[in-house]
Structure formats: structure tokens, C-alpha cells
């Protein structure tokens, strides 16, 4: 018998070990897409930066180049100012902007002559400067001229300032290839703050194809320059893919070498183990405060001809981009064109897109883990700012950009419970079968990093009326349990709000798990009686705890009262029924919780 038990033990350990996988550790962006802000009422190709004085500055093409300012991080915007008007039947297009380390603001743009073409009007790159915070702007400064026909033009300027003070301007250039449809990425440099510029230098070219739309960054290591481009030369794709080309800062594109189509310095950006192959162009690249990188591009992936903006988070080398998400909820008819990204404030990501003829922005919040403060909210389905959730309005985790069912979740904990609050903007939500609305909340209570739900994994399915069913992992899937947890709900014609308290003891924890790895997942389910649509956190799987998001329980100022679950010791000499066994009250680690239930603190 002992031998059989030993073999069963070895078999179980092998099974658990085989299920253990690497934990997902990257950042994901949570977009607050419920209320996009309009920056410009018309136009295209908008770009945005945060100035050194805290204001935001945006530009776009709209009858010339226009700029607008925000003094409240994008909540409202000034009336647009035209700084580069069109002239001589030559629209000024596709602006980009940068503020230099000395405070100078520079806007670059792309004159694009209209037909009929004449040799005196050429496709080119120009800049204008402001040295007074954007109140006034210089005259037009020449950078480069291409040919005078569309087939041999130049396109899409983008800036980068190096630590040395060198200002770089990257652009796509067809002019060297008048007998083919090829295109290269070119670079001009300025060593006097944009007043004068060098001749262009080729830095990226794939023979027979069209490298385009460059956006450069200096990585957080201050050692590598990476340029996001669109590249239509990848075998078997037949379309543009977001791609990066790179050089070291010490090399800085010196000499006549460039990144060819076969160079190891040319990389497909997206990790397709996590993301589907979303073909498309117009990439944009930025660096997060933690050194990770965020990439966007436009694509009709999975939606006919409806163009959408997609974003991804990459590592500190601007590789291995994962966590695909859409900043804008677009329904089924809206196109989102020629988009860009900015990183502002303390790391908020701003997505800017051409949406239904307007230029709009939404904010995204990069998170590796969710923050959980020490508090004891009242579980009643109502909200009070004094309840102690992490966000002042209990809106730490926004979702909804994929389905349009906008929601916000937040967390708190105390000595007895983990608390969840979820606000879902879904009026007259269904709680009845079949195919109701609701949320599914998952928690892995012991930090197991597995590709199957173990017996330490729990799933809580909540309906809008507060009804809850609980399932537990069994090593391959889920089995419903009879566990009961406290829930409350409030619902009306605009939204429903759910709150839940999960006792630590009910999920196998004998102490508050400060410093331990708990992970959670959340799904928002939209039902209509005939089907359901589920929105998940990017790159999570409901059956793979290794993909879930870590919880960070914030230690209170006085943690002495949360070390052990339960507050009352049972009387000496008394016995209690615990899991079918009569246990003496003085057994080590046995407590009474609220005078009702016995739990083990082993």
C-alpha cells in the first residue's frame, strides 16, 4: 500500500510539474475608451507630445498644419492655430513634432503638390520652430526636396533628439527609385536645433519593396536607436507588417551601411505566439517609463475593410511585442486612420486617432499588476469614495474597447476578505438564462504558474443581480463547488454594479498573503439571450493561471492586525466539527471565524 501511495504521489508531482510554465510578466495596457476626447473636429495624421511645462501639444493636417494645446492633460483643448498654411496648390501634410532639451518646439511636415504637377513644386520636408512655448512660430525651414510627381515623392517626417543634442529627422523616400516602386528610409541631421540640415542618408532599404512611415526612439538603455517602419517584404504575408530596424547609438548610422532586407537588425515586431498576425501599416513607437516599449499600427484584421488601431507592449529592446489591444471602441462602421501614441505624465499612454473625420484621443494605463489597498468596503453594491478601493472612484481597471461594454474594476482587502468592485455600463442587463450578462472573476490563491487551473484556482461567475456560482480547478478544467460568498448588486437602465467579498479562508489561505504571488483574471460578458460576447484582459486565458495578472497587496501602516485570519479563540476543552472530523479546540492552529465557521491555520 505504501508503494502504491508513493507512486501516486510521484505521478501527482510529475503532473503538476509538467503543467508549470513561465509566468506572463509583461505590461498590458488598459484603455479607458468610454469617453474619447476630440482634439480637432477635422483633419488627419495627428501627433501629440507633453511639453516640459506640463501642457500637451497636438498637431494635425487640416488645410495646412494646425496645433492645439491642453493645460489639463487632455480633458479640454484650445481652438486650433494654423501655423503652416497651404500655398501654391501644395497642401502641407503629415506633421510630427518634438520639444528639444533647450525648450525649442519643432514641427515638421510634408509638402505634397496637387495635380497638375509642375517641376517648380516638389514633394519635400519642411520644419517650423517656436522658442516661446508655441505662441509664435518661425518661417518655413527647408530640409529636403524629392521629385515633383507622386510616384517619386517623399513622406512622413519623424523626429528624434540624441543626448548629444543632435536632432534627427527620418522620412520615407521614393525619390531615388524613379524607375521602380521601391522606397527607402532616409535620415537628415541638424546640429543647431533645426535651423540647418544635412543631406539625406539611407538607413533602411529592402530591395524590391517599400520601407515606409518611420518612427524613431532611443531605448531606455541610452545605447540603441530603434525605428519602427512598415515593411511589405516579409515572405508569405503579402502586406505591410510592423517592423523595427536598429543601430547602436555609438554607431549612429555612420558610414554607407544601411539595414537591408536580410539584416539581423531588421526584426518582425510582434510575438505571434500571443497575438494573431495583424497585417497593416502606419506604425508608431514609444518608450514607457519602465523601459518597455509600446507599438501601434492600423489594420483591418478580422473586420473586412474597417480600419482599426492596434497596440502592443514590447520589451526593453523593442522586441517581443505582445498584449494586443484596441484603444478605441469603434463599433462595426467607424474607421480609425493614421494614428499615433504619446507617453505622458507618470506613464499614461495616449492613443490619438482619426475617428469618423475627427481627431480623438483616449488614455491607456499600463499595468503589470493590480494594486490592492488595505480597507474594508461595505459590500452593498453602492459606491462611496471613503470605501478605500485603490482608485478614488473604484476604477483602477478599465475595459470595454473590444466590445463596447465599458466596465471598471477595483480591489481592496482586509484581514478576512479580498474585495472586488465592478461597474459595468450595460443597461437593463440580463441575469436570466440563456446567455446572460455578467462577469467572471478568477483567482489563483497560491501563485501557481500553470497552463491548467489547479485546485488552488477559483472562478466566480457573477450575474447582474448578484447571483454567484463558484468553480474550482481540478488540474484540467473547472468543477462547480457549493461555496457561498457575499455579493451585492445595484442595477438600472444605464449600468449594473457588483461587489463581492471572498474570504481568504475559503480559497485555502490561512494568513493574509502579503508578499505572496496571487494572480487574477477578469472577463466581462455581454449576453443578448441568443449569444454572448466575452472581453478578456489582453493575453489572458481563462484556463491558464500563468497568463493572469498579479495582485500587489499593499501593506498597511500597521500590519499587526492582519497576520492571521479569524479573531476569536474557541473555548478550551470544546470540540468542533472540521471537515467531518471532531477537532479539539486547543489543537494547534484552530480558530473560530466570527463565531460560526472553523478554519485551519496550519
Image (tube, rainbow, N blue to C red):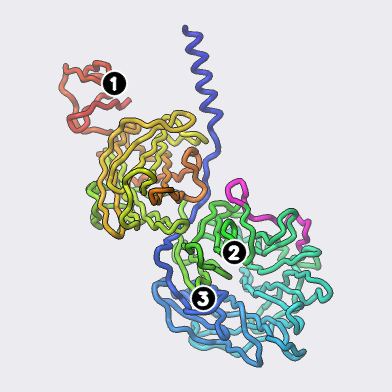
Q: Position of residue 136 (x, y in %)?
A: 51, 88
Where is residue 272 shown, x and y percent of the image?
62, 49
Q: Secondary structure at mark 1?
A: loop
* Residue 119 can be seen, yes or no: yes
Q: Mark 3 sits on what residue?
A: 357
- Camera-nearest residue between 24 and 131: 24
Q: Which residues are magenta?
A: 259-276
Horizontal and vertical percent position of residue 454: 45, 31
Q: Which residue is more in the foreground, 298 or 383?
A: 298
Q: Earlier in the sequence, mark 1 or mark 3?
A: 3
Give the number of the disc on residue 579: 1
Q: Secondary structure at mark 3?
A: loop
Q: Is residue 263 magenta?
A: yes
Disc 2 on helix, strand or loop?
Answer: loop
| In front of the other: 563 or 565 | 565
Question: In the image, which disc is placed on residue 305?
Answer: 2
Mark number, residue 165: none
Amino acid at each position: 500500500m505504501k508503494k502504491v501511495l508513493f507512486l501516486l504521489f510521484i505521478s501527482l508531482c510529475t503532473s503538476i510539474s509538467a503543467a508549470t510554465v513561465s509566468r506572463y510578466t509583461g505590461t498590458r495596457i488598459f484603455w479607458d475608451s468610454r469617453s474619447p476626447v476630440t482634439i480637432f473636429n477635422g483633419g488627419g495624421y495627428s501627433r501629440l507630445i507633453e511639453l516640459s511645462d506640463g501642457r500637451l501639444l497636438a498637431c494635425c493636417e487640416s488645410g495646412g498644419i494646425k496645433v492645439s494645446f491642453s493645460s489639463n492633460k487632455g480633458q479640454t483643448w484650445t481652438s486650433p492655430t494654423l501655423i503652416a498654411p497651404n500655398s501654391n496648390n501644395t497642401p502641407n501634410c503629415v506633421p510630427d513634432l518634438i520639444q528639444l532639451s533647450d525648450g525649442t518646439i519643432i514641427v515638421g511636415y510634408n509638402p505634397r503638390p496637387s495635380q497638375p504637377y509642375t517641376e517648380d513644386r516638389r514633394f519635400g520636408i519642411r520644419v517650423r520652430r517656436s522658442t516661446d512655448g508655441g505662441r509664435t512660430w518661425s518661417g518655413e525651414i527647408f530640409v529636403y526636396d524629392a521629385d515633383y510627381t507622386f510616384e517619386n515623392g517623399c513622406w512622413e517626417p519623424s523626429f528624434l533628439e540624441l543626448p548629444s543634442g543632435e536632432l534627427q529627422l527620418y522620412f520615407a523616400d521614393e525619390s531615388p527609385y524613379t524607375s521602380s516602386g521601391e522606397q527607402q528610409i532616409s535620415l537628415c541631421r541638424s546640429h543647431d536645433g533645426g535651423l540647418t540640415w544635412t543631406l539625406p542618408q539611407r538607413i533602411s532599404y529592402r530591395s524590391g519593396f517599400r520601407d515606409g512611415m518611420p518612427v524613431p526612439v532611443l531605448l531606455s538603455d541610452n545605447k540603441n536607436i530603434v525605428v519602427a517602419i512598415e515593411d511589405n517584404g516579409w515572405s508569405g504575408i503579402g502586406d505591410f507588417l510592423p517592423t523595427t530596424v536598429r543601430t547602436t547609438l555609438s554607431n549612429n548610422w555612420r558610414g554607407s551601411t544601411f539595414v537591408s532586407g536580410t539584416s539581423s537588425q531588421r526584426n518582425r515586431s510582434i510575438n505571434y505566439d500571443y497575438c494573431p498576425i495583424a497585417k497593416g501599416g502606419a506604425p508608431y513607437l514609444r518608450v514607457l517609463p519602465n523601459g518597455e516599449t509600446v507599438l501601434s499600427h492600423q489594420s483591418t484584421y478580422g473586420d473586412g475593410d474597417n480600419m482599426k488601431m492596434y497596440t502592443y507592449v514590447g520589451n526593453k529592446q523593442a522586441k517581443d511585442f505582445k498584449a494586443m489591444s484596441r484603444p478605441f471602441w469603434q463599433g462595426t462602421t467607424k474607421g480609425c486612420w493614421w494614428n499615433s501614441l504619446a507617453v505622458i505624465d507618470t506613464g499614461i499612454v495616449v492613443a490619438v486617432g482619426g475617428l469618423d473625420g475627427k481627431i480623438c484621443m483616449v488614455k491607456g494605463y499600463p499595468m503589470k499588476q493590480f494594486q490592492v489597498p488595505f480597507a474594508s468596503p461595505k459590500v452593498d453594491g453602492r459606491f462611496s469614495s471613503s470605501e478605500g478601493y485603490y482608485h478614488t472612484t473604484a476604477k483602477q481597471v478599465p475595459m470595454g474597447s473590444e466590445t463596447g461594454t465599458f466596465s471598471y474594476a477595483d480591489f481592496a482587502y482586509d484581514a478576512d476578505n479580498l474585495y472586488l468592485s465592478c461597474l459595468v455600463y450595460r443597461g437593463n442587463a440580463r441575469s436570466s438564462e440563456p446567455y446572460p450578462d455578467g462577469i467572471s472573476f478568477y483567482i489563483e490563491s497560491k501563485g501557481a504558474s500553470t497552463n491548467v487551473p489547479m485546485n488552488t484556482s477559483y472562478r466566480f461567475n457573477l450575474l447582474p443581480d448578484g447571483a454567484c456560482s463558484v468553480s474550482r480547478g481540478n488540474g484540467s478544467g473547472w468543477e462547480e463547488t457549493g461555496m457561498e460568498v457575499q455579493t451585492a448588486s445595484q442595477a438600472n437602465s444605464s449600468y449594473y454594479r457588483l461587489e463581492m467579498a471572498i474570504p481568504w479562508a475559503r480559497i485555502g489561505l490561512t494568513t493574509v498573503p502579503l508578499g505572496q504571488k496571487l494572480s487574477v483574471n477578469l472577463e466581462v460578458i455581454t449576453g443578448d439571450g441568443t449569444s454572448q460576447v466575452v472581453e478578456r484582459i489582453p493575453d489572458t486565458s481563462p484556463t491558464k493561471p500563468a497568463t493572469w495578472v498579479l495582485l500587489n497587496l499593499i501593506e498597511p501602516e500597521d500590519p499587526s492586525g492582519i497576520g492571521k485570519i479569524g479573531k476569536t479563540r474557541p473555548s478550551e476543552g470544546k470540540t468542533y466539527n472540521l471537515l467531518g472530523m471532531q477537532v479539539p479546540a486547543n489543537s494547534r492552529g484552530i480558530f473560530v471565524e466570527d463565531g460560526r465557521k472553523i478554519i485551519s491555520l496550519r
